[in-house]
Image (cartoon, grey):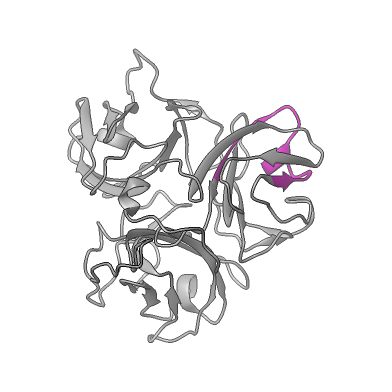
Amino acid sequence: MSYTNGLDDPSSVFQTTLYSGTGSQQSITNGGNSDLQPDWLWIKERNGTSSHQLVDSVRGFHLRVESNNNSAELDAGQAGATNQNVTSFNSDGFGVKNGGAVNESGKTYVAWQWKKQAGVFDIITYEGTGSAQNISHNLGVVPTMIIIKDRDNSRNWGVYNVGMGNTSAMYLDLSNDQGTEAGWWNNTTPTSSVFTVNTRNEVNAGSQSFVSYLVGNKQGVSQCGVYTGNGSNDGTFVYTGFSVGWLIIKRIAGSTGSWLMVDSKRDPFNSGGSANELGANEGNASNDLAGDFKIDLLSNGFKLRDDLGDANAGANYIYMAFADQPLVTSKGVPATAK
């Protein structure tokens, strides 16, 4: 994989934060080395089945979409709402009120947060036309992962990943394998300034509003791509060049499978036991999806530790990973391994 220049502190771009619900308005403060005011906030209840809550600074923190269903954008944070969800993006965290999906008493939550940063992450909204069009973006590098949702209608999410190429797409909210046709990306690879959508309603329905989340490969911070499973308990190792803090995996062909999500805050140790996986397309609680899913998040990548079909059969899988810390800083200084 090719990268742009490194970034010494990944916590300035991405952080995972765990918190407990109180049922009353509260502010959640991040614990990374750098302060992070999120531009994209993704919250999931860990010990219950509330839907994933995705909000961002471009649409406004009060407008949510949910990765595990195809619902249109909902206003869940407006002033005076009975069950308000996210109430603010703060200088180092965010605020929540009393919505059950983000702050119910007795529930625990995980919040994944990204900041817009050249070469790493960008958010773009656009209007669909129903015919092929180029969408300008500000990532500054070629996107390696693009996630798109129709804001106005109940339509499935569309996902582009560099490991599938420009003729295939996935649904973030479904377990389906990849769909192959020109109607998604117009058989056109994204560039450092635009990505192309064709006639699929999921990414370009006429007179509809869309939100897109773009990720690039940046040394020491982020990596998206594809790997091939080996069907063994001594599973495939994927090199990222950084200590993996967050990871999502999806099987792309030959069978259905969940979008498995793990992070180093909920799974801080690689003990060989079952991971506390969540599913982007599922409302399930942690460790309630894929059976005995085992994975090591290492100082330089990740390694599968079982032959589970959702992650390590003899098949291809796309992934997106973000760092806890780089293996080597942009100045060539080795970081501390774990």
Q: Is residue 282 above or below residue 39?
A: below
Percent position of residue 85, x then y: 34, 28
Percent position of residue 326, x then y: 34, 63
Farthest residue to the front: give it.
Answer: 331
Picture quadrant of residue 40: top left
Q: Visible in this render: residue 329?
A: yes
- Is 72 left or right of 19, judged from the image as shown? right
Residue at 48% from the left image edge and 50% from the top image edge: 120
- Is 239 left or right of 156, judged from the image as shown? left
Farthest residue to the top: give it.
Answer: 80
- Is 324 left or right of 175, judged from the image as shown? left
Q: Looking at the picture, tell me which residue is in the foreground, 89 or 52.
A: 89
Q: Is residue 192 above or below residue 26?
A: below
Residue at 35% from the left image edge and 17% from the top image edge: 81
Q: Looking at the picture, tell me which residue is in the foreground, 104 or 26.
A: 26
Q: Looking at the picture, tell me which residue is in the foreground, 298 or 98.
A: 298
Residue at 62% from the left image edge and 73% from the top image edge: 254
Looking at the rendered image, the quarter that the N terminus falls into is: bottom right
Percent position of residue 163, x then y: 61, 66
Range of the magenta residues? 195-213
Q: Is residue 121 above or below residue 221?
A: above
